[in-house]
Structure formats: C-alpha cells, structure tokens
Image (spheres, helix red, strand yellow):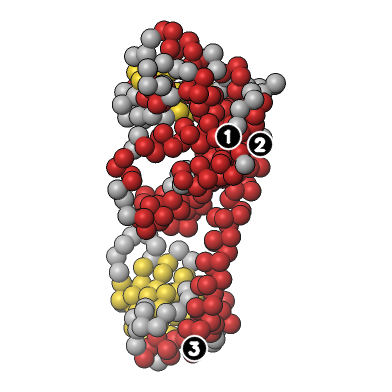
Amino acid sequence: MMIAAHFFDGHDARLQPVGLDVRDGHLHVDAPGFERSYLLGDVALAEPFDQAPLVLRLGDATCEVPYGPGRQALLAALGYRKSAVERWQARWPAALAALVLLLALLGAGFVWGVPAAAEFIAARLPASVDTKLGQAALAGLEAQGMLAPSRLSDDRIADVEALLPRALPARSRVPVRLLVRSSDTLGANALALPDGTIIVTDAMVRLALDDDNELDDDGKAALLGVIGHEVGHIERRHATRAMTGSSLTAAMSATLFGDFSAVAAGLPAVLTQMRYSRSMELEADDDAVAVLRRNGLEPDVLADALEALERARPGEDKLPRWLKKSMSYLSTHPDTVERIARLRKTAR
C-alpha cells in the first residue's frame, strides 16, 4: 500500500508530500516529478514514540510519516521489532528503577567522584596558578571597592602584622603576607587568597580590642588564632582546591543540563562547593589550634573570637532556630556555634 509522508531532500527546508512503498527489498519514494529508491538496509529508523511522526533517515534526506495506520504498516513492512531497552522503558516500574539508578550514579559522582578528581587535579597544578588567582582576586576586591586602606593607626597595624611570624609553620609552602584593610562590605572578617595574602579587616581588629581600646594579650591571642586559621587555608591550598571542585561540578552540570539555564547548571556547583567549604573550615580550625598550642595558648581564645563575631551580628540571633539550623547545612562555613563547641571540646 502507498503510505503518505513528508520528504525533505536535505538541501533546502521545503517539505514535499510523497508516497512510500516497500517492495523488492527497497523503499520507494514517489512524488510528482521524481522517484527515488533506497535499499532497506540503508534506511535508518529513529526510535519510534507513540503518537509521534515516524522519522526515516535516507542518507542526506529525511522522511516523516505522520501518526496513523500508515505508520504502523510501514513499521511492519520494515520488519521493525522493539529492542529490549524500548520494551523496558515502556514499563513504568522499570523506567522508575532506571531513573533512581541514574540519580544515584549522578549523586555518587557529585559527592565522591568530583571531589576525588578535584583533589587529583589541584595537587598537580603549579604554584604559579595560585599566584595568578590570588593577584586577580585582590585586584578584583579593590576594583569593586570592597577593600580600602586601613583607618587604624600605624602602630596598631604593626601590632597585627607582628603576629604573622608566630602563625607560620617552620617551612611555609608559599611566602605569606598580611594586609590590614578597611571594608564596609566584609565587616569583621579575615580571608586568605591563594597566593599567600591574608587580609584582616579593621572591624576584625577592633573586635579584639579591650575596653580601653588597646590590643592586650587576650586580643593578640584571639587574632593569632584567626590568622592561624587563614594560614591553614593557604598551606592546604583550600582556595585552589575549592575552585577546581567548583569548576568540575559546573562543567558536569552544564554537560547534563546543556542550555537549560545558568541557574540549573550552576546550582549543583554552588551546593557542592558549600560542602567542600565546610570540611575545609574545620581543617583550618585544626591548624589554628596547632598554632595556638605552639605559642602556649589554648583553643578557647579562638572560640572567644568566634563568639565575639556572633555578637557582632545581632540580626542573625533573631532568626528562628529551625531556620538557623537549616541554613547551617547550606552554609559556606560550618555553623559557628558548632565550631565554638568543637574548639571548647578540643581545649578540654
């Protein structure tokens, strides 16, 4: 029987109504003004979907057979039989099992595969990568107005800078320098850049001052713990490792989601990166404890500094407990209360 179809010759976008007929081992395409014949072995059949046109690949040409009786007759004439995969996916329990397995494999890739690959790659990146990343990060912070020259006195800045040698290991991986900067955006904070630059904000230093606005021994001990924490980030290359993991996750997401949206591709990268940061923060806390004990101090001083940071952010204390608990699981840092308790336990 002649089956109505739509024919595209592969050279222009014009649709041409044709009739299809299977005989003598050939697929015959007939239309007013032309006739073509293809060996059945050369006809590529795209996977059929219920109530969708049947698509035939004929070299450069394409033929679409609308859904209807002719479609089924053509499938029978071509000797089509469903593959095991098609039969499997037609059963919803099997399809659901396949989906669950796929999600499990993707989850395992994000949770274990990407971090392992990131560690492998980061360990082989040269130190020049850290240098360029750190320089670019500092330039970006300054260009965006997030960092400005310190408003503290020269003597106060010198007191803070004098703490750095006490926080460094016997052999530092890279040259480390400490900058005291003013930042309305960062507030009371400290951060480590990949090239070995540690930035301590004016507000962070002011938190360590006593009631007489002096940097006493307790204040210096608290800042030493903070600086030791940032040195830990640098020595362990946390910034470079985190960047590598984030980049791999983003690439994996883009491969899976394509152009679905920047959010869809970026969200898994963000969530995975949050997880990396939690473990890295705890590692840096351990390094800070080692620095403090090397200087005859206990981890309590860092716990005190974290408590001061908590008090400096009163808006967060007003959050409902359930919300704060939920946010702690998606935070780039572990919950501060958790860190304080961990440091107190270490001191005991």
Position of the N terminus by quadrant: bottom left
- Determine contact: label 3, label 1, CB under 8 Å: no
Q: Nearer the viewer, residue 284 or 37?
A: 284
Residue farthest to the front, as pictured: 211
Sequence-first tag of 2 and 3: 3
Q: Residue at x 29, y 65 (%)?
A: 14
State the residue position of label 3.
Answer: 77
State the residue position of label 2.
Answer: 123
State the residue position of label 1.
Answer: 299
Sequence-first tag of 3 and 1: 3
Q: Nearer the viewer, residue 342 or 251?
A: 342
Residue farthest to the top, as pictured: 154
Element assignment for label 1: loop
Q: Nearer the viewer, residue 18 or 344?
A: 344
- Residue 25 horizontal/vertical position (percent): 55, 84
Q: Residue at x 61, y 27 (%)?
A: 297
Question: Seen in the image, is 117 located left or right of residue 63?
Answer: right
Q: Is residue 197 above or below residue 157?
A: below
